[in-house]
Amino acid sequence: MKTTILLLLLSLSSLSLRTAWGADEGSRLSLVEVTRAVLAHNPSIEEARQKWEAAKKRIVRETAWDDLKVSANTVTARFVNIAPNAFTDQSLSVEQAIPISGKNRSRARIAAAEAVAAFEQMRRQQLDTLAQARASYFRLADVYAQLELNRRNYESVAQIAKINRAGYEAGRQSVADVLKSETEATKLLESERDLEGSLTETQSQLNVLMNRDAFAALGMPDTLTMSQLPYALDALRTTTLANRPEVQSAKANLEAEKAKLQLAHRAWIPDPAIGLHGERYNDTGQALSQIGVGLSFSVPWGNQRKYSAGVSEAKATLVAAEAALERVEKEAIGRLRIALQAVETAHHHVEFCRDRLVPAAHQVFQATQFAYESGKAPFADWIAAQQRERDLEAEALEHLAHHQIALAELEAVVGADLNVFPAAETTADNK
């Protein structure tokens, strides 16, 4: 019965491993490929890009003069007797407003500042999406590494279980040792099933971010290595304040509010409209009887309360925009500190686990194995030492993935390429 169970475990393991590794065996997936695919095809980035393009067109619209006004009149019926050429029968007028106040230029400056804000919103979408894609890529690499580690451990435990079964049948091994080794092999198979679920979830997330079908096959990611951050704290503070989209957007909003205050002041200045009028009398053979020139403009000075309120409103919103910029800059430095701490913590975990805990656990395992083989330690101690070493190796892999993810999130916080990952051209770099 036990031999049958062991054979079943081995067959299930073979099938499971084929399922895990056979999706797109032999092909590779690099981080550069993922980055380019996300930048080129992600719908969220494209949506933000088109909003920015629309915002740029509004600058031209706001700069333009008001449309030319044309009006024409003709008399269709007259029910009184009048002398010839006493009244006009047809008239035509053309009128153009002249923006001497510069209101159109102020509106154009507002539109330009709002276009900058739209550009920064596109950059924020780009940075966040790239961070998500890179995090998914690193998780995918971690899952594959965990699967490989789990496979090696399963093969080792399955071999021990086979040896224990043979020893038990020969009367040299207890049934408890056999059951423990077979149970441990079964637990590793269950762990593999959980890892396969994580693999499917991560692959789906990465496909969606690259605007591909969720079921599309992906190649094997590159093996994880620990990247280094080539920036000092002072340089990162400066880079964050100069590149973080929220800071730049707040600066653009401040410029827009300054232009709105200027527009509120210019609202006191009327824009004249110059008109050209042509008339034709009722009993003349000429196509045009007389030409007149007219001038018209609004009179804002009689509505002081209205325009003074507009200036006061613009001043208040300008002060609010200045406070918002100060708040956003402080928040940016706060987020930078948190992101840096996450990188440093993950870096510490990687080095501590990889350089101290895993080697120590390996020494304990070797010592326990020697003691077990010499009959000085029970099999339970040996299997526990192996499990401890396996858990620490898996933990070291997770810390390495978390370190890379923390670096990706740091770039999103700073808002600039920190030369941590392989370079890929972005939309922002082209503009």
Image: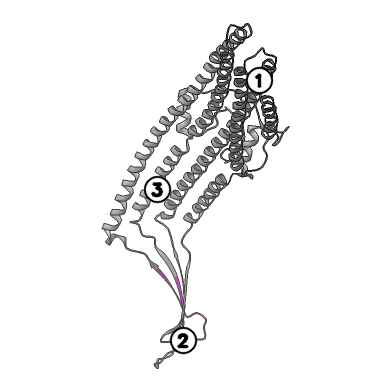
Mark 3 vs mark 1, CA separation in Å: 78 Å
- Magenta residues span 276-294
Mark 3 neighbour class, 10 Å CA radius: few under 14, some 14 to 19, many 20 or more:
many
**Mark with earlier residue (3, 1):** 1
* Position of residue 59 measured from the top left corner of the image (x, y, whole percent): 49, 52
Amino acid type at circle 2 is: Thr
Residue at the location (68% across, 15% down)?
Answer: 167
Camera-side residue of 24 and 46: 24
**Number of the label disc, if any, that sits on residue 259:** 3
- Identify the disc placed on residue 76: 2
Q: CA distance from mark 1 to mark 2?
A: 109 Å
Q: Against 321, is 57 above or below?
A: below
> Is residue 399 shown in magenta?
no
* Image position, residue 283 (x, y; %): 47, 88
**Which quadrant of the figure has residue 405?**
top right
Front-most of 66 and 324? 324
In this view, the mark in front (1 or 2): 1
